[in-house]
Amino acid sequence: MKSNARPLMTFLGHSTVLFDMDGTRVITDPLLHARVGPIRRYRAVPDPALVAAVDAVLISHLHLDHLDFRSLEILGRDRRLLIPEGSEKLFASHGFANTRALAPGESARVGSLEITATPALHSGLRPPFGPRGIPVGFIIAGSHRLYFAGDTGIFPGMADFAEPHIDVAMLPVWGWGPKLSQGHLHPASAAKALQYLRPTAAVPIHWGTIWPLMPALFFGSRFHQPPLEFAEHAAHFAPDVKILVTMPGEPVAWPEAVARQQGRPSGASSGSGS
C-alpha cells in the first residue's frame, strides 16, 4: 500500500529544495522563473501551488542563481526569510522586511524545525559590485537531520556537521555552465566530502537545470552527467552512503529507497529516474 504522506524532500532544480518535515515546510534558494539574466531554465518551472505554503525561505548566499528577488516575490514579500549575515540592507532595499540574518553557527526556530547556519567556502559577493554576505549552508533538524550545503568547496570543517548524525546531505555537484570556478563542489570533491559528513544518504543537487543561452549542442556531458559521476566516485570514497540520484522537479525517494537498500552494497540508486 502506498503512503499518502508528502515527500520529505523535493528537488525542484538547481539549488532549490523543498523540505516538508514535522508539519513545517521550508524552501532553499528558490529559483522559480524560466530565466535568470542570460541564463535559461531547461527544466519545467516549479508549480506555484507546490511552494505557496512554505513557512520560511533559506538563502545560502547572494549570487544571482541563488538569490532571485523575482522568485521571492512569487512566495510573497511577507514570507519569513533566513538570510546570510551582512545582507540585511540588500533585502530591505527590495522591500523584504521579515528577515533574520544568520552567521555560521547561529540558529533560528521555524515551526517544528531548528535551522542552523553552517560555514561555506564560497564567495559572498552580490554580482557585479553589490554587497557581501557571509555564505552559509544549513542544518535542518527535526525528526530527521538534513544538511543543505548551498554552494561551497570542500573543507575539513565539514566534519563538524556530522554530529549529531546527518540523515541526508544535499550536495552540489556542478553548476550552470561547462566549467566550475573555485568554491564549488564537483562530482569527485562532493564524494570526498561524504567522508567528512558521514550521512546515511546523499542527494546530488545544483545540476541539470539552468544553462547559458546557447544551443543544446554545447551542453555536453556537464548538463546531464555530474550526478552519475558523483555516484561513481561515492562508491569508492564513501561506499556506505546511499546515493539517491533525483531528477530536477522530482521528490527524493527517502526513506523508502534507503529502507529497500539496507543490507545491500552501496551505489547509485534513482530517487525518481535518472
Image (cartoon, grey):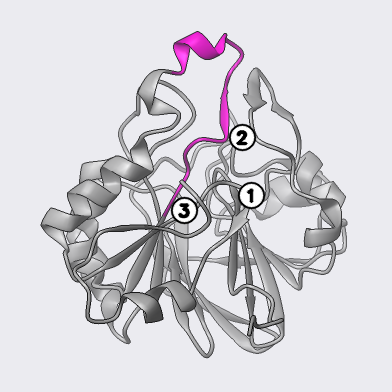
Q: Which residue type carries mark 3?
A: Gly
Image height check: is 231 above or below 223? below
Q: Which residues are magenta?
A: 204-219
According to the picture, the residue beneath numbered tag 3 turns out to be 150
Q: Is residue 155 left or right of residue 53?
A: left
Q: Which residue type carries mark 2?
A: Leu
Name the residue located 55 percent from the left edge and 57 percent from the top edge.
84
User: Which element is circle 1 on?
Assistant: loop
**Within-10-Å neighbours for mark 1: few <14, some 14–19, many 20+:** many
Separation (CA) of disc 1 from disc 2:
20 Å
According to the picture, the residue beneath numbered tag 1 turns out to be 249
Residue 173 appears in the rendering = yes
**Within-10-Å neighbours for mark 2: few <14, some 14–19, many 20+:** some
Q: Is residue 60 left or right of residue 229?
A: right
Residue 178 at x, y percent in the picture: 39, 20
Splitting the image into 4 quarters, where does residue 100 fall?
bottom right
Disc 2 + disc 3, Cβ < 8 Å: no
Q: Which of the two labelled residues, at mark 1 and mark 3, occupies the earlier sequence position?
A: 3
Q: Nearer the viewer, residue 242 or 59?
A: 242
Separation (CA) of disc 1 from disc 3:
18 Å
Q: Which residue type carries mark 1?
A: Gly
According to the picture, the residue beneath numbered tag 2 turns out to be 64
User: Which element is circle 3 on?
Assistant: loop
Splitting the image into 4 quarters, where does residue 199 fall?
bottom left
Q: Nearer the viewer, residue 261 or 243?
A: 261
Name the residue located 42 percent from the left edge and 40 percent from the top edge.
123
